[in-house]
Image: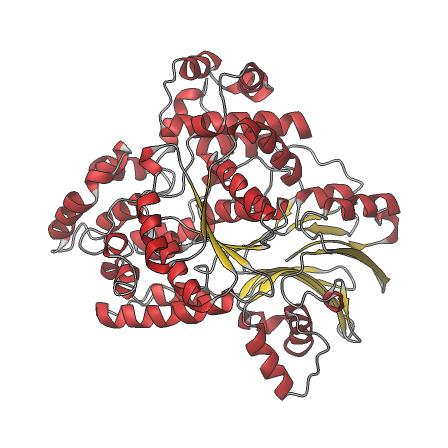
Amino acid sequence: MCGIAGYIGGKKFFPTKKRIKNCIDQMVRRGPDHQSHLYFKKKLDYLFCASRLSIIDIDKRSNQPFEDENGILIFNGEIYNYIEIKKELKKKGVKFITKSDTEVLLKFLHHEGEKKIEKLDGMWAFAYYSKKKKVTIISRDRFGEKPLYYSVGKNNNIIFGSNIKYIKELSKDNFKVDEEKILNFLKNSYRSVFSSNGTFFKNINYLEPGTNLIIDQNFNIEFKKFWSKSKYKPKINDISKASKTLKKIVNLEFKKSFRSDKPIAFLLSGGIDSSIISFISNKNQKNIKFYSFKSENKNYDESKNIDLLKKKFRFKHKYIVQDKKNNFQMLENFIDDFGFPLMSSTYLAYGNLCKKISEENFKVLISGNGGDEIFSGYYAHHMSYLLSIEKKPYFKKKYNEWEKNTKPFIRMDILKDLKKFKKILKSKNPTFHENEDYEKYFKKKLNIKNIKNKTYSDDYFINHLNKDLFEDSIPAQLHSIDNISMYYSIESRAPYLSRNFFDLRNKINKNLLINKGMAKYVLRDAFKNDLPKKIIYEKEKIGFYSALNETINLKNSKIIKLILNNHITKKYLDRNLIKSKIYKNDLNHQDEKFIFGILNVALFLQKFN
């Protein structure tokens, strides 16, 4: 895990020594173990900067930039199948001087090139220069676990980096805040942020996941998708076959994603996703520890299930209670470091977890993110599933199962009413069912571009899963967990985000994903003999959530001023309604999300506008 940054272009706009130093200084959190940069000149001028958090082959021989006679590499992430790739390359006569996945990636790119990047499993953002072909490949992994931003200058130059502030440090341009992006963030919450590749600064974009950016010596730029996503073509209709196949792949994929030369920490909730991770890791790993967030809110308390797992597997575990007094300062620090608003108040709880985990000297943190989006874990997914089978003869049976086993646990009114859900979604993105709750805060209708409603599948249910996976939910989650974990110099990993899980999901009949009124049924069935029955058949979706009143004191005079007196609130929002909601404690879940969004925007504007 590292931080990377760079410049490619003419000498005239090349970063000064001071700018390079400032950038390297910014990169220390992402790579506290080593920082360096390399300048080289071909037809263009090149700057490759890297900072290293040592995880695999912690010897200094694997520091970056990593160079041999054929090329140069800076790399952030982990290649999970590096051992398998290394064996293949050795058979071809390739020799290695380190035990790192960095060197494996460099040699792989020499021999296989950008056309074979599809063979890589893992999470990455890298820049590679081929001395033979005189071409640079900048690449980002399939699901976008590792961030990568870029800005193309008007004078044939490009600056890129793991963090927006690296680009701002290296560039001579003054990047203005994108007000339209801010308004979309408020109108549609975090789900809108990654629906386009623009950031909160004009002319700074993120490289889309599963994409290579290729630059030749004449500064010709080309974007190429390296992952052709499989389509939903269900072939597996038998639950026994689906479960056995899934369990086999889970065991193989998770073991690869647990590779590390440093001790590993795991986040543990009482849900099925992290419970499966705990079962497999406890069976195969040493020097590990589990951490859980202790919520004050009984609706989000999963301690009973967590304690069941602790008793069954006897692993090391700790509950973390967040430090509410320091959360506001933490929020300010995060926004300053990321160059982004925070997506949700829940990530302050995640920040508290990472802080404690870092203090106990863990450098790798594994979570269950992605399981819900691939295997269907949200109440809204269940609604989309019912809509997708509305005309099927078995609809009534499935509806009754939902009504009996799932509906009693749902708190949001719209997700209890299929007709209302359907009506709202006729003109809206299926993942934006909440945004009507935000509309009351605006003085008038916004004159901003509508978010494009992309289609990923002809099946309404599968399309909803894929929108959450590639556009709305997972990109926002990954952005937050990577930036926050790296703020504390911890590498985050999400092993459910595997192309093999995605491909298998597309072969399984959707009626096995949701069955007997329960979400993620095939995943539950696969591990029904390994986990406590209470967890396997838990019908309530609790989730990792920290309510706003647990994280921030909204009535603090400083916070009230920030929320009410920034220019976005004054120009576009109903200040009286906001003030009334706060002082009367009249905030439902959606209100809390909106108010927290305004606070984030205010802090962001205070720092960067």
Residue 471 position, x and y percent, is 46, 48
Residue drawn at (53%, 39%) of the image: 352
Q: Quadrant of residue 506?
A: bottom left
Horizontal arrangement in the rendering, residue 274 relative to residue 122 (left or right): left
Horizontal arrangement in the rendering, residue 110 relative to residue 181 (left or right): right
In the displayed structure, would residue 455 be above or below residue 564?
below
As rendered, which of 256 and 111 lies closer to the eye?
256
The C terminus, quarter of image: top right
The N terminus, quarter of image: bottom right
Residue drawn at (35%, 49%) of the image: 306
Horizontal arrangement in the rendering, residue 293 relative to residue 177 (left or right): left
Q: How many marks?
A: 0
As rendered, which of 98 and 284 lies closer to the eye?
284
Horizontal arrangement in the rendering, residue 553 relative to residue 544 (left or right): right
Residue 303 position, x and y percent, is 34, 43
Residue drawn at (39%, 32%) of the image: 296
Q: How is the image coloured?
A: secondary structure
